[in-house]
Image (cartoon, grey):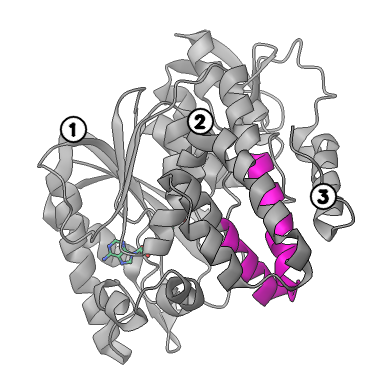
Amino acid sequence: MIEKIQNFKGERMIQKAERLDTSWAYNTKDLPKDRELRLLDNAQFIYELALAQLELQSLGARFELTNGLREFKLLEIEDEKALRRRLAYFKFVKGKYTDYFQIIRKNRTRSVNQYLTHWIYPYKGKFHPQMIRGLLNIIGLEEGDTVLDPFIGSGTTAVEAQLLGINCIGIDVSPLCVLQSKVKTESIDVLPQIMKLKEEITNRLRPSLSNLKGETLDDMINLIPEKKTENFYKMAKLVAISDNARRRREFSNAFLKNLELMIFSVSDYVQIVEKLKLRLGIMDIKTGDSRALPLDDESVDGIITSPPYSIALDYVSNDAHALKELGYGISEIREEFIGVRGKGQARVDLYNKDMRISLQEMFRVLKPQKYAVIVIGNATYLGQEVKTVEFTIDHAEKTGFKLIKNIDKIIFGLYNVMRKENILIFMK
Ligand SMILES: C[S@@+](CC[C@H](N)C(=O)[O-])C[C@H]1O[C@@H](n2cnc3c(N)ncnc32)[C@H](O)[C@@H]1O
């Protein structure tokens, strides 16, 4: 068992997180006996209701809304078990909890959607994981199929595909993103090694714990012989650096606290896989360029992705400290990044040109009759709205895609640069 670290702020946080089990989002008091189908408490927005209905249809259920848009009556159902195993927006099906409700209760953070390993590393512009699970259902992907995310970012698509038994190819130009995505999906394979090493590392560092420096830790991390374990500890160090920078938390405390939480999260993942008897998808996550995908023509069954939000977020500057820490040159990386090169109108033009090539690549590797979902919003740059959504639709259609659905999705947090996003579902 994982021993608890006493007298650390982190310890209090873990306890707080454990109490989240009784919070509104995970409430188990409402006895589901006679409830056929009910939305999860955290589904709050109109677009979520739209996605909930689409995933039901896609999984072969006929239904009608009954009580205040939150409860549904099932009229016809193809496979009750499949509904319970796959649905993203529902708490229970015919009186029994869905797998997803049980999954989201494995959460060590205060944010409802940062369950299991999703929270690891504070990456800006993450997908909402529940939406990805819903979209995987909506585009009809099944166990053993392959989904591609050519801008994998923090790995949200990868974790959600893995949980549903769907294989995932994740590509990103940023080595930091590749590392995050791998750690979130691969650490479950090496949990015993990770735990064993935690004892060794904390014991060896303990005498100098109060003045633990990155370099001392690096020496130990560099000696780890197994790649997935090494990646996990590299990530733990980066999480601590970011915690230290953002919250002014002393580095050694930040490292131990986050290491503890990361190990809890990986254990949670292992436990839920066993409890729900999940067959996990196979992950293939690598650095690469979405403008030249290292994939054969017509080789993937679906695409779910969000490209860089035009020029709204400068990912290179945002992650500069972590990229440097991993030993990468910022200026070389910038050369391959979409949306961060050039100034003024030149930046917008370059972005459009790069995205056009990326869309052509997505079209090339997708099998015919299959779907590509692109989540994108218009950004404000130098006081002007950049019509990225219109551009994406226009160019995707010129490439050969057919727009099947366009769902408005209001987003919070980026109000200064963006108010809403669109979920665009295309068919090849
Ligand atoms: C909006 S983020 C994706 C976020 C992701 N959906 C998530 O849940 O974390 C866009 C990503 O595109 C990546 N990117 C930028 N240029 C790229 C390129 N040429 N090829 C592949 N990825 C690129 C960035 O590193 C960034 O991680």
Kindly indicate the quadrant of the structure image that contains residue 60. Answer: top left
Q: Which residues are magenta?
A: 236-265
Screen quadrant of the N terminus: top right
Vertical arrangement, residue 228 with respect to residue 396, above or below: above
- Would the CB of label 3 be found within 8 Å of ligand 1? no
For marks 2 and 3 on the same chain, the one whose residue lies earlier in the sequence: 3
CA gap, disc 1 to disc 2?
A: 22 Å
> CA separation, marks 2 and 3?
45 Å
Q: Quadrant of residue 22?
A: top right
In magenta segment, residue 419: no
Up-down: is 324 above or below 236?
A: below
Lower sequence index among marks 1 and 2: 2
Give the residue pinned by disc 1: 369
Write the residue at 44% across / 50% down.
181
Nearer the observer: mark 2 or 3; the answer is 3
**Neighbourhood count class around disc 3 (C-alpha, 10 Å): few under 14, some 14–19, many 20 upward:** few
Task: Please tell me whether the stretch drawn in magenta is mainly helix, strand or loop.
Answer: helix
The circle drawn on residue 53 is: 2
| Quarter of the image where the C terminus is located | top left
Q: Residue at x 85, y 45 (%)?
A: 15
Residue 31 image point, x, y percent: 81, 17
Query: Can you identify the residue that label 3 sits on?
Result: 5
Dot 1 falls on a residue whose secondary structure is: strand
Q: Position of residue 260 (x, y in %)?
A: 71, 48
